Image (cartoon, rainbow, N blue to C red):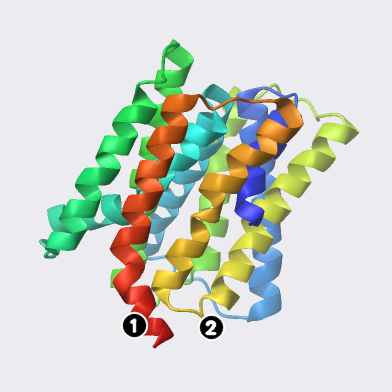
Amino acid sequence: MLWSLAGLFVRAIDLGLWDLILWRSLFACLCLVAIAIARSAEAVRFDWRFCLAACFSATAMFCYVAALTMTTVANVLIIYATLPFVTAALAFAVGREAASRRLLMASTVSMIGIVFVAGTALAASDIKGNLLAFAMTLSFGALLIVTRRNRALNLIHVNAAGAALCAIAAFPFSSGQLPGGGALGLIFMLAFLTTALAFLLFLAGGRHVASSESALIALLDVVLGPLWVWLAFAEDPGKSAIAGGLIVVAAVVWYFWPSLRRSRS
């Protein structure tokens, strides 16, 4: 649920893109480092796998915030909801991991939903935002594959390094000025709630629920994210985006339903 607040904070913060990315990434890095220290004193392993995962994390973080500033929150979250299918496609392309018929069918249906979402992109900024949202989904899918194949990678360390890389990349393009107290407080809340605390709760909760249940719970973002900005800023996602979102959510639910029933039984 905390992840769904990201769009609300981005809409509330009146700041340039690069400044927003810089300070959000900086606060996220500090929060994640604090969590890593509090959880354990495990040393960071700086090998090529760690660096690759950190680069994917940084790319996903940048594209996520940038996409939210360029298109509707609904579009970003609907595209992100296709993550299970994008990850499966990447796994097949990289490692020839077999895909089930059910996965292929659900992926095809979800792509139809994305076509509906893309149809709402009338302005150039909407097109850029949708492309950035897809790039974010690709990057996060790649991160999942790297971490799944390298179980020794500590996800908190990886995301802290990714946030640091994102801040370093944004710094040369930022204004170099300290945001006002109100904006700085909102950025800290954005970083703490939607990055550090949300990630910590996700790791803790993942130990108690099946992966299929986690995937379905994550779909709450697709509903709640647009709802918050609609209530606060009257941001209308449009009928096509709503239709596309329903199609994508239905495809994801249908795909995970057998696993959910098995875990319940």
Q: Is residue 205 above or below residue 121?
A: below
Q: Report the side of 41 relative to 154 (left or right).
A: right
Q: Nearer the viewer, residue 27 or 1?
A: 1
Q: Is residue 242 above or below residue 205?
A: above
Q: Nearer the viewer, residue 215 or 93?
A: 215
Label drawn at residue 208: 2
Quadrant location of the C terminus in the rendered image: bottom left
- State the image coordinates of residue 65 (x, y, percent, origin top left): 56, 36
Q: Residues within 10 Å of mark 2 (few under 14, many from 20)?
A: few
Q: Nearer the viewer, residue 165 or 139?
A: 139
Q: Report the side of 64 relative to 189 (left or right).
A: left
- State the image coordinates of residue 219 (x, y, percent, origin top left): 49, 55
Outermost top residue: 123
Q: Which residue is mark 1?
A: 262
**Marks 1, 2: nearer the viewer:** 1
What is the CA distance from the residue labelled 1 to the residue labelled 2? 15 Å
Outermost bottom residue: 265
Residue drawn at (77%, 48%), measured in percent from left and top? 189
Quadrant location of the N terminus in the rendered image: bottom right
Dot 1 falls on a residue whose secondary structure is: helix
- What amino acid type is highlighted by mark number 2? His
- What amino acid type is highlighted by mark number 1? Arg
Residue drawn at (61%, 48%), measured in percent from left and top? 4
Label drawn at residue 116: none
Say which quarter of the image contains residue 263. bottom left
Outermost right residue: 181
Q: Report the side of 221 relative to 60 (left or right).
A: right
Comes first in the chain, label 1 or label 2: 2
Say which quarter of the image contains residue 260. bottom left
